Image (cartoon, rainbow, N blue to C red):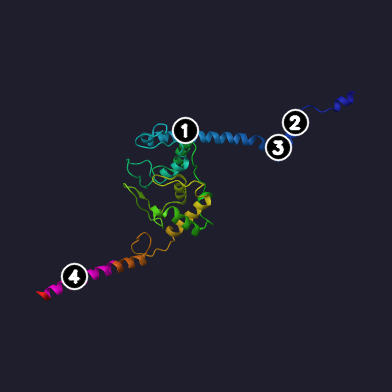
Amino acid sequence: MKKLSARRRHPLAAVVVLLLALAATGGLYTAFAPASKAKAEDTAQSLAIEEGKKLYTVGCASCHGTDGEGTSDGPSLVGVGAAAVDFQVGTGRMPAQQPGAQAPRKPGKYTQAEIDQMAAYIASLGAGPAIPTKNQYNPEGADAAKGGELFRNNCAQCHNFTGQGGALTHGKYAPDLSGVSNKHIYEAMLTGPQNMPAFPEGVLSEQNKKDIVAYLNEVNGPETENPGGMQLGGLGPVVEGLFAWIFGLGALIAVTVWVTARTAKAKRS
């Protein structure tokens, strides 16, 4: 009996063996790391929100309210989402210099890290569109021809068929889309800034948006061939020639009629 008792394993022996096996296979890390990683991410997000609130209080609260509830000088930001902040602040439209019919695009005042912090704070006020990932707005492999069709059906009424922009009512306008980054074009479709309607997933899918971005890169990209002359909405010299022909010929006909009438009148006198 004493020999049998001496050979009996210690109660913790199985636990030790299991821990050694987990450590050898990486299972020990897998068992404990996710919780630590999630906690670290939560802490980083909380810090971003805290810093974003400080930036918001200094640069935005005077128009949008201390808690983003909006005032007579600025709309509520509850539920607009991080993508709206990234677009408005990233394109320099916000903070606005003064209230007006429309905020113009201008050089930004904040770094991307600061924009991300403000976006995190605004996103914490209410659910809204998140900042898109690079894969979402990267036009590589997208169908530019399909994007052109979608753009003409949904956007050309305001932006012109090549994105050159155009006038709207009451001092508002559809901005020129040349020189706008792919991310900001995607975010504009996602959030519908100012006078523009939003195009959520149910209206334009992620692929549709990528196709439109690809089309705009084709017609307004740095390697796009410029036909020269006056833009005339991106139509080029052919339309300039037609314009000159119609109005020039009309002017010549008017001068001819006037000269003929003067000559006839002179002969009668």
Residue found farthest to the right? 1
State which region is magenta.
247-266
What is the number of the mark on residue 50?
1
In the image, what residue type sits under mark 3? Ala
Q: Which residue is mark 2?
A: 15
Q: Which residue is mark 4?
A: 258
Q: Along the polypeptide, which appears first: circle 3 or circle 2?
A: 2
Please give the name of the residue rendered at 30% of the width and 69% of the height, measured from the top-left corner. Answer: 245
- Compared to 111, does 144 lie above or below? below
Residue 25 at x, y percent in the picture = 71, 40
In the image, what residue type sits under mark 4? Trp
Give how far apart the Cα atoms at labels 2 and 4 are: 110 Å
Q: Along the polypeptide, which appears first: circle 2 or circle 1?
A: 2
Q: How crowded is the residue under tag 4: few (<14 C-alpha within 10 Å), some, or many (20+)?
A: few
What is the number of the mark on residue 23?
3
Please say whether residue 230 is one of the residues in the magenta stretch: no
Nearest to viewer (mark 1 / mark 3):
1
